Image (spheres, helix red, strand yellow):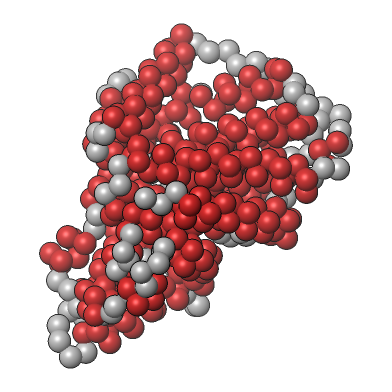
Amino acid sequence: MDGGGPWIASAIFAAVYAALAIGNVPGLRLDRATIAMAGAAAMLATGVMDLGEAAGSVDAGTIVLLYAMMILSGRLRLAGLFDAAVEAVATRRPGPKATLAIVVGMSGVLSAFFVNDVVCVALTPLIVGLCRRLGRPAVPYLIALATASNVGSTATITGNPQNMIIGSLSGISYARFAARLGPVAIAGLGLTYLIVATVYRKALREQSPPRPGPPPLRRSRARTGLLVRSVIVAAATVAAFFAGVPAPVAALAGAAALTLDRARPARDHESVDWPLLVMFAGLFAVVHGFEANVARRWDFSRWIGDGSPVAPVSLASVFLSNLVSNVPAVLLFEPIIAGVSDREAGWLALAMSSTLAGNLTLLGSVANLIVAEGARRDGERLGFLEFLKVGVPLTIATVGVGVAWLTLTAY
């Protein structure tokens, strides 16, 4: 489409991203998945691109990887892995700071491999129950869960949705990605513990009468077998990632291996966040329409020059990720990264900063909202201002560490 094509594409793109920043459209009840699909439909209806081009713009590898990892993570939850881990902590009754360290480590490590959103869905009610059994205030541990899940997910391509997009678009191998960003995640988890422990140093000394918890888990032979099979398949899948098997292929094979049993498939598909997949498909099309008609004509290399892209990409990503959320922000950066001299450093900086930016505010990531909503259902309140006490210093510290690490180790 010539003539008005760039203007139409720009208008649709701007409208979609403005709506995503607001969270809805005034006067209409639209979620982000609907906004993205409406934008894709507008691109098609106005002739900015045809159906074949729109379909080709959707990165199938990202969609397949995200779907398969949701199945895998959901099966681990159904098999009782998260319940067993928390029960093991409860029976040992560690001290307040030891419990905090366990929560940070457990949520961070699990989120590195099995999608932080799913980990937060599974662990939030269990952490609330653990705190009540041990007579501890829940808020410090819930904030630790949310922030550590974001930080831990920085480490690998399968840690969160935006990393999956970056892994697919950049072509960086799973092992290479983990080697470059794993140290940032490890340092970030240490900072998470220190900052939460400092902010809540008085609360972590408080004790309240323990509440009776549920009886110890009694597993049937069938449920134990399901847990063992799920852990074996998940471990084999992660090993395949590091061995160089394409992540979507390895994840889909693992998901298929788990679902080909006597369990009801419907239970596995309940673990899939279908609106998120719809939003991905719509945003791929919207961003492609804008890039093909508008952004392709811009020279992004002038914005960064020949220097390292790590700092400028990171700062812009932190801002945009908190404005429109990290997944739309990452897609917006694709033409920018294509124009820098060190593309790997640019992609890694984007993965690091867009993920760690989620800790800035309670609204910064889906994982935070999952923890807050899950806590509310269990009678615990995690407020916006309360979250800022940890979120602001933690984001500044972890992004600073990430920028320094990627700058000093660039090669």
Residue 240 shows in this picture:
yes
| Circle count | 0
Residue 113 at x, y = what percent?
Answer: 43, 36
Asked if 120 appears above or below 299 in the picture, the reply is above
Looking at the image, residue 14 sits to the left or right of residue 323; the answer is left
Residue 151 at x, y = what percent?
Answer: 55, 46
Residue 227 at x, y = what percent?
Answer: 44, 19
Q: Give the residue furthest to the top.
A: 221
In the depicted view, which residue is nearer to us: 346 or 125?
A: 346
Looking at the image, residue 253 sits to the left or right of residue 231; the answer is left
In the depicted view, which residue is nearer to us: 316 or 33?
A: 316
Identified at 69% across, 22% down, the residue is 90
Residue 305 at x, y = what percent?
Answer: 37, 73
Q: Quadrant of residue 259?
A: top left
Identified at 65% across, 15% down, the residue is 216
Looking at the image, residue 341 sits to the left or right of residue 315; the answer is left
Identified at 32% across, 66% down, the residue is 340
Q: Quadrant of residue 190?
A: top right
Q: Quadrant of residue 69?
A: top left
Identified at 44% across, 28% down, the residue is 76
Residue 45 shows in this picture:
no
- Considering the image in quadrants, where does the N terminus appear? bottom left
